[in-house]
Image (spheres, coloured by chain):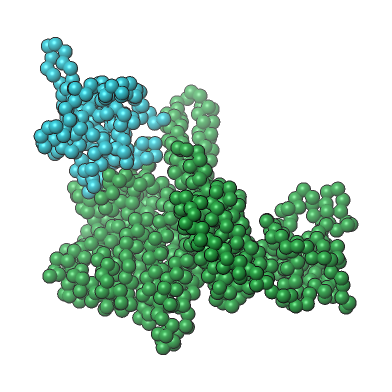
Amino acid sequence: MSQAAQKATLAPDPDSETGAVAMLAVTADDELYGFPLSSVREILVPPPLTEVPRAPAPVLGIIAVRGQIITVIDLPKILNLRVEQRAPCGRVLLVDTGEELIGVAVDRVIQVYRMEPRQIEYASAMGTELSDYVLGIGRLASTPGTAEEMLILIDPLSLLGRFK
Amino acid sequence: MSDPRDNVQQEFLAEAHELVEALSRDLLLLDEAQHRNERPQPALINEIFRSVHTLKGIAGMFGYRHVGAVAHALEDLLDDLRLGRISVDERVLDLLFDSVERFQRLLGLEDPQSPEEEAGVRAYVEAVRSIGHAAHEEQGDPLDRYAIGAAVLSVLTEYEEHRLRACIREGLQLFRLRASFNLTAIDDSIETLREVARDDAEIITYLPSMEGGNEETIELVVLLASRVPEHELRAHFEGRYGTIEPVEERTHLPTLPPRRTSIPSAAPSMAPAPEDDALHASARSVADSVRVDIRKLDHLMNVVGELALVRSAVNRIVDHFKGQSVHRQSVTDLDRVGRVFERQLSELRAGILDVRMVPLGQVFGKLARIVRQAAREHGKEVRLVVTGANTEVDKLIVEELADPLMHLIRNAIDHGIEQSGERTLANKRLEGTLAINAYHKGSNVVIEVEDDGAGMNPHEVRDAAIARGLLSAEASRELSRQEMLNLVFLPGLSTSSQITGMSGRGVGMDVVKTNILRMGGMISIASELGTGTKVTITLPITLAIIRALLVTIASRTFALPITAVREAIPYRPRDVRTIDGREVMTLRGETLAICDLARLFGFRRPSRREGRFIVVGSMGNRELGFVVDQLQGQDDVIIKSLGKSLSSVRGFAGATDLGDQKVALVLDAPALFSEYFDGPNVLRAMETSP
């Protein structure tokens, strides 16, 4: 309805039985992140953000999406990756955190990757450096001649944890 | 939307609980009447009968055997009450009140057929039966005095016959009204007649007369009982309805037609039921209303919001073409259609909001039982007086109110109202009074919980706060009487077991306050030692839509609920002084505290110091001036809650969509007030305490 709301055609994960997960790859601050496709409801061209005074640091502001007020957070900030202010984001993902839809500001939406279990290294198997918000690291099959790329896989269910 | 059977089951439970609540409310009224030594209104007993009857019906359908059995026994008891075979006394009331608890427990059972309940239910049914069968003997038939034809008497229902006898016994005069009614609208006309007659007379029955009708009309003979003299009734009814004449008293004894056997009429539709009291509306509403999930209404409201966006899109198109010479007529037409659309839309919005409104009586009913129970526990005599039960507020508010009110009532009875011995010594009425008053005030609803108990000693409250380490003795010295009382709202004061003996309010006043504030309301307490305590709750009528003042603070738009705004005045920096680290100014001889919102919110201070405004907010008896940059004007805004992700952020009641995808935060005036006034105070007290 609203011209800024651009619905992405998100296909359900076709191979869920084989353990493959569909991940939506996005960039934020030159970093690649992946969200389980099943948790992404919508991709929006961001409407004007309304700043919320005294909100926790990762909160960029609020937007209205079809009558509902959505909190928009900055992905790098919630991962404690960066502190300073950043230019307005390019897209907002509406992510279902299980309790609440949260807007996640990203720079660009890249594409959907289907990742086999062997491509994913879970955070629990790694050191403590990674934040609680990370499911793990996804390694993209590199094509000859290019460097291997990594996706930081975000656990949508944990996004609300920061605020509690 | 899982198992459709589950849904049906949920529907049943919701309806059953509603019926039990209605029953509980009506019992309270009955109890009240009993306390005043009044005869219970027939309409009230009918209402109770109806609730129980409906409950029995639906319980049967859903296999709630125990509920059905209890309802069935009660139905018989109520029928005896209705027909005057037994009268209302403490024993009957106890059984009736007991049924409410019992129904609720039985409805909550995992297994509605549970054999463990068998014995309890049977004992209850026995107890009810034993009362019911102590039927009373009639002493001489008063009907004999009147010349009412056997043909008429034979068609009266047992209930009508009972009312007829009762009216005669009470010394009412009988009249016959002959009136013509249009056949097509006869039901409405009779309803109107009931309304008209209500104050002056009771309609016993109406029967078609053998004469005077034609194809379109029918003449009815209406049998009325009234205390009003004949000429007044004439003035009232004749001309409007038809002729009225007294029923002659007869001198010789007639032979009565044989009495019909007692069959409780399932739907006492002929009962003269002046259903004016909103408390009575509930049972009726079960029949002709739809239960709607509040989320569906929220959804509709969102759709309305979407339509508003369509409307502004159309506006933009019109604006775009207005300056051009092409399609001038079409643009004008489009503009007009757009306006019509907007008008209808606001009507739709108002309509949806209206659906959300329910009478406060829904929550008061629950309280009736608490009052009775708490009074029992303490061996105190307490009379509950409710006014304004039909005051309407948003459904969400009604639900949120139940807990806070329950706390207040418990407190009033536990700590406020004295034992009757003490009351006698204090020269008070033996029976304590607990009053709940509700009324609209502007776009707020005010609820007062007032008792005529011992009142609170502000110094004791203060001492308790000091003893609990919530306040330093030093800080307490500056406190006014009212400020000492306000300490009851501090968390921590209430949980102590040591102070339950205090005449103050123990349990969870801080919780009560938090709940009320969360709804955007205010709570205040007033107490006079020896006279009683009054807690006043002020709430917005609806959580969904408010009138707001839109203001600019550091280039951002905020909405301030108009209910909290008293006035707006120009801000003159030279009038402002700093006292105790706080900015204040003098307004009409009074000191007004000033809160610079830009600074509070951590915005960089705008360079401009002149041309700003102070919006004077008022909450209860406090005032606070909010400094803002600009006033944009008033608007009706729909408040949307902020997500849980922002629940830790203070000062905002929600946000509102201003259209064109712009969102403004709605300031939470009560929270800002309490942050400004209470926050630092409490902190200061904490810091200095040992």
Residue B513: x, y in percent?
Answer: 33, 62
Q: Along the line of sight, which residue is nearer the eye, B11 or A1?
A: B11
Q: Along the line of sight, which residue is nearer the eye, B611 or B134?
A: B134
Which one of the lettered chains is coloured green? B
Q: What residue is rendered at 23% in x and 34% in y?
A: A155
Residue A115 in the image: above or below residue B637: above
Asked if residue A96 can be seen in this view, the reply is yes
Residue B478 in the image: above or below residue B313: below
Q: What residue is rendered at 52% in x and 63% in y?
A: B99
Image label count: 0
Return the residue found at the far top.
A144
Residue B327: x, y in percent?
Answer: 51, 24
**Position of residue B197 in the picture relative to residue B393 (left or right):** right
Quarter of the image where one finds residue B690: bottom left
Q: Along the line of sight, which residue is nearer the eye, B554 or B95?
A: B95
Residue B550: x, y in percent?
Answer: 35, 49
Residue B594: x, y in percent?
Answer: 25, 61
Asked if residue B616 can be seen in this view, the reply is no
**Position of residue B341 in the picture relative to residue B261 (left or right):** left
Residue B1 in the image: above or below residue B325: below
Which one of the lettered chains is coloured cyan? A
Quarter of the image where one finds residue B536: bottom left
Q: What residue is rendered at 23% in x and 21% in y?
A: A116
Quarter of the image where one finds residue A140: top left
Q: What residue is rendered at 24% in x and 66% in y?
A: B492
